[in-house]
Image (tube, rainbow, N blue to C red):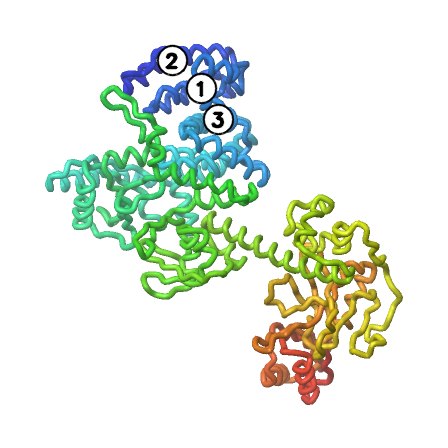
Amino acid sequence: MMRQYELVDRVRSYNPNTDEDLLNRAYVYAMRAHGTQKRASGDPFFAHPLEVAALLTDLKLDDATIVAAVLHDTVEDTAATLEEIESMFGPDIRRLVDGLTKIKKLDLVSKKAAQGENFRKLLLAIVDDVRVLLVKLADRLHNMRTLHFVAPEKRLRIAEETAEIYAPLAGRMGMQELREELEELAFRHIKPEAHATVTKRLEEVTEREGKVIGIIEKDLKEKLAARGIQAQVSGRRKRPYSIWKKMERKSVSFEQLSDIFGFRVIVDSAEDCYRVLGIVHMTWPMVPGRYKDYISTPKQNDYRSIHTTVVGPGHSRVELQIRTDTMDRIAEFGIAAHAHYKDGRTTELTQFADESRAYQWLRRTVDLLAEGDSPEEFLEHTKLELFHDQVFCFTPKGRLIALPRGATPIDFAYAVHTDVGNSAVGAKINGRIAPLLTELQNGDEVEITRAEGQAPPAAWESLVVTGKARAAIRRATRAAVRRQYAGLGRQILERAFTRAERPFSDDKLKASLKRLARTAVDDVLAAVGRGEMYSGDVVKAVYPDLELEKRGAPETKSAGATTGNGKGWFELRKGDNLKFKLPGEAPDADSTAIPIRGLGGDLPVRFAPDGGAVPGDRIVGILTPGEGVTIYPIQSTALAAFDNEPERWLDVRWDLDDKAPQRFPARIKLNSINEPGSLAQITTTIAEHDGNIDAVAMVRPNADFTDVTIDLTVWDLKHLSAIISELREKRVISRVERVVG
């Protein structure tokens, strides 16, 4: 266990002006608070916060962060209080300890909804002060190093949490070394057999080819020195987890991997990085497609380096990373590399956090919390961005947009602005028109074509890869659906008020919101449109003194009966308010029927699944809560299921636009002779009569005949009748009839 003076010496080694008294008081306070507590390993519990503090001294962090590390378990695991810590160590350290205490309580691998909410709390705890995250990552690293002392079931939970949350977060903050060690330790416990197998194979390869590392190091140093470049060259074997992920990603065996060893070349300047690259490529053949320049286009976590792979001595592939000492420090320590100690003065880490691209990503991610997504959606979106590598694309004006690998122009549009994404209708990639689902590559210039009033299709949500795009599409889809239901609800209410002979207006509805237990007029309209609120209840709420006709099951009448007015109106057995207009006649002036225009309007309307309906049919609408209106032909046997629910029946009529004709769904069933070419005759007849086949199902009841069911779309009832009539004339068809569900 680290002694008191050793902690002070470690901090003084990089910060000569450290507050030794503060460090000593924290050491003594935490040691007394933890007392005789033991860890699962049997070691004194106090050894853990000291190890965490030691890890942070390697990052050269300020006194407050080191003290917070020493104290980070006191409030949760001892009798210490935040008030006591503030009185002894100040408000800054109290805030850090408070944030760390809250994080410790979070379960990040519980069921999805709770996991998402806890992940939100985690990000909110760290966004105001990045030092909270740095202490937590160091805490998690030490816990992972001693995880083998923990019970197996708890061990697996902690390892999964590390792999899913903390390792990716460390990578996003640019702390690559820390991320790699966390991944490696988690891999050891999550997949112990795979870890053992890969480790054994790596040791065999190292024993067989390990001398190649020394040869390449010596050869490369000599060649660079001959060109006047002073460089540090170090080679190492890749970690088992990195090897395993590559085998999974590329679906290859261990024997098929060629770049097991990697080399890092550290030089004095960015200019020297490119000189080294030239020398390396002139010395050994470059592997095509394996060159990446993260100096000219840094990653979002501030990572800068040149990557290349060459065929080195012994025909073995060798991966090289070329960078400066500053770039190497940022690659290793990430955002913590922004803490500087110069001329005896401390430059606060928080001052540089705002300049960090990694921390800017964290702030943008937390900004999504205000967008109204559910916790599980937020977790899903954030994980997508945590795990993806990146591509760099440009707007026509040269603005650099960093996106996850696999991103499309749709993701690009939303990265530019939500309004751009919502109105996107096309894209040009490098000056050429391209599909919106094209996978973007590094260096692509993307131009988005927009159309005002356009709304993103709901299907886009499953096609994009960025969390921002998915969240925006989901919000736009919800808003569009809500507008549809509100539009339907308005039409239903207008006709309900007309039947009640009372005026309808938004102002009157607004005055009744309390009685309806809603906060806005649109809420009422949408609830009526969804079928969650009966229109008669709204009328009664607006006009409490109105006596509405009791809605019950009326006397049964034949479906085809007409009323005595002789105008072609007819009534169903469902009630006096359910009147249906014969197609082709002008509607009565007092008609309260809701007009429909196929499936393309603003109303959430669909047709009966088993047979549909076509213009010319007498129709009825059935309101289904949460789904909208389903249109049935009056002769549909399915309507019997709604006999005892008169409040769900709606008065609807066809409202066709001659300038924009539409097809409508229908189903026919026929019995054909089982001989070659019979199906061809059927489909040809339908095609010749301008019918469009959507689906065909065939059943052979015996060797001589086949039952064929065809879903098709037609213009109207006359069109459908003509097709059926023509099919009946065919020799191969014994029977054909329309199916009405």
The quarter holding residue 325 reads top left
Q: CA distance from mark 3 to mark 2?
A: 20 Å
The quarter holding residue 632 reads bottom right
The residue under the point 30% across, 25% down is 347
Q: Is residue 579 left or right of residue 169?
A: right
**Which numbered disc, 2 or 1, marks the residue closer to the eye?**
1
Residue 270 vertical placement versus 151 (above, below): below
Which residue corresponds to mark 2? 22
For badge 3, the amino acid type reads Gly
Quadrant (top left, top right, bottom left, bottom right) of the N terminus: top left
| SS label for mark 1 | helix
Q: CA distance from mark 1 to mark 3?
A: 12 Å
Count residues near mark 2 (Cα–Cα under 10 Å), then give few for <14, some for 14-19, many for 20+: some
Q: Is residue 555 left or right of residue 686?
A: right
Residue 580 vertical placement versus 331 (above, below): below
The percent position of residue 340, horizontal first and vertical second, equals: 28, 26
The percent position of residue 670, horizontal first and vertical second, equals: 70, 79
Count residues near mark 1 (Cα–Cα under 10 Å), then give few for <14, some for 14-19, many for 20+: some
The percent position of residue 403, horizontal first and vertical second, equals: 39, 49
Residue 91 vertical placement versus 699 (above, below): above
Tell me which numbered mark, 1 or 3, is placed earlier along the sequence: 1
Which residue corresponds to mark 3? 99
Front position in the image: 486 or 302: 486
Which residue corresponds to mark 1? 91
Front position in the image: 676 or 543: 543
Front position in the image: 718 or 488: 488
Can see residue 669? no
